[in-house]
Image (cartoon, coloured by chain):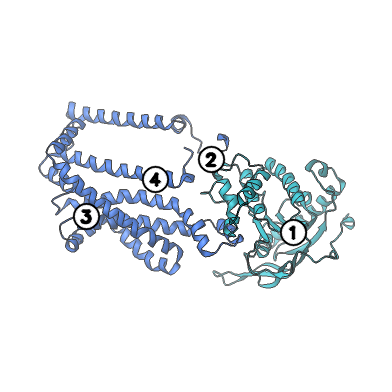
Amino acid sequence: MASTIDQHGAEASAAPLISVRDLTVSYDIARTGDRLIAIEGVDLDVREGEFVTVLGPSGCGKTTFMNVIAGLVKPSAGQVLVDGEPVIGPGPDRAVVFQDYALLPWRTVFENVKFGLEMQRALKGAGWRERVQDAIELVGLKGFESSYPRELSGGMQQRVGLARAIVAQPRILLMDEPLGAVDALTREVMRDEIEKLIAATGKTVLFITHSIEEAILLGDRIVVFKSHPGAIKEVIETGLERPRSERSVQSDPRFLELRDHLWDALQSEATAAAVSK
Amino acid sequence: MSAFLASGPNLGRGGIGAWLAGLSSAGKAGVLAIEVVVMLVIWQLVVGVFGWINPVFFPPPLAIAQGFGELVSSGVLAANLPISLQAWLIGFALAVVIGIPLGLLMGSVLPVDRVVGPIAWTIYATPSIAYQPLAKAWFGFGIGPVIFLVTISAVFPILLNIAAGMRTTNTSIIRAGRVYGANRMQLYRSVYLPSTVPFLFAGLRQAVVLATIGMVVAELSGSSSGMGAVIIRAANTYQTDQAFAAIAVVVVWSVGMTQVVTLVERWVAPWTRKGR
């Protein structure tokens, strides 16, 4: 079965937008004096406009991986290039959607969406109000502009998080298990919406998840992580037609094949992790 | 819309608890009023009508009301209440002016926290009554020692709460700020300071109560004026009805000021308003 799964090989001719070279991140644990290797020797190229899902068990370092690309964590070795430039910190070309939404509870929806622009000192001149309003409407929150986050459901809060990222007009959208804290039904609805939204905006996306279905449904490519230490186990092209909808894809034989393959890959990972403990 | 309103943790309320939680604010006020009236009636019956307790030690409500009338008509209240309130307000203002900046500094600069923190906790842990004789020695017999005790009682809950608020700022929000390129100044203004506001108001509410205790303690001995002096003088001359009336005035002030703090919080920080 695995023979029909293409291992990702040569890159496309155009220079990649994100280029990760032999990336290693390790931490000193002050309490024990040990050194914890979060991720080791990660290489990955992402083309402009590509939707890459990163799949792996908890604690495999996939969030650390994303944080390095976001510029929030410094690599211990290796480097990350975005559009050929080494990442030395956060930048306006990248925005992050957080698992716990990371909204400011003292700000209304409108003010939260505005937050990114404000921190980027991009509120000068006309037009930013319209941009904020457009982003709010794009994620379906029209009418909730003056609500506070605690008045919204989890799914709606993440829509705010999404709007905040989109309005900053980044080239790269980094999404750290954005639907991880959302209920199952909302999750399915939002998956479809995210797919449509990204297809419409043409953004490059790195989407972290521990859901096999999510990784297949959303990704052009799936990067499978293994743990101890965190590293790339394999990279798979999904090869599924777009636009995809939850229902049409789930009966696609290719989907079933990918799901079985990823299931086996993750299960051996999970077993290995359980044994090593 | 209301279906999305957070209603706090559901602790499985049932029966009278559910009924109380479901009341409107007018309904809650009604329940409180009934509670107070019932308590006063029982008190009046037990002491005033049946005489089970010596009314000199524990005067009934109507006697206290009469005592209050005497405090007003004799001019004692008018002579002493403004002195107490003046000391309270000056002392509290000082506590706010010292506590807020110092708390912010403690919360943001670790060395300051390590130096000021243990000292602050030590003074905070000392009963304010212990400083009372010293305050007299330092500040004489006027309003000075009262202001000192009010300030030293009120400053630490403000300071320590703010410092805790700064330190417990949600790291996810800080990361969000950094992702969008926020500099240090922007992070303070837009992330750390607003997230400290609920802690500030929690500190202020504690500070109001402790300031009132500090005020009365300072006035109880060696003072010739203020509500504390009125209480001790009335009690020493067995006019316990007047002593209780003076205590009631102090309590009304204390509770009233916590309500003022809550009102200001709702106005300044509407996002902290709970759904119940």
Instruction: Check if mark 3 and mark 4 are on a common chain.
Output: yes
Task: State which chain disc 2 sits on.
Answer: B
Sequence order check: which comes first, mark 2 or mark 4? 2
Residue nearer the viewer, A219 or A119? A119
Q: Residue at x 35, y 44 (%)?
A: B260
Q: Are marks 1 and 3 in contact (CB under 8 Å)?
A: no
Dot 1 amino acid type: Glu
Could you tell me which quadrant the N terminus of chain B lies in? Answer: top right
CA gap between label 2 and label 4 equals 22 Å
- With A4 as the anchor, is B204 left or right in this view? left
Q: Is residue B250 above or below residue A206?
A: above
What residue is disc 2 on? B6
What residue is disc 1 on? A269
Image spot of residue A144 (x, y percent):
59, 41
Instruction: Check if mark 2 and mark 4 are on a common chain.
Output: yes
- Toward the front, the furthest residue is A126
- Label 3: how many residues lie within 10 Å, few (<14), some (14-19) or many (20+)? many
What residue is disc 3 on? B146
Instruction: Check if mark 3 and mark 2 are on a common chain.
Output: yes
Dot 3 amino acid type: Val
Image colour for chain B is: blue
Image spot of residue B234 (x, y percent):
13, 42
Q: Quadrant of residue A184?
A: top right
What residue is disc 4 on? B264
Q: Quadrant of residue B124?
A: bottom left
Q: Secondary structure at mark 2?
A: loop
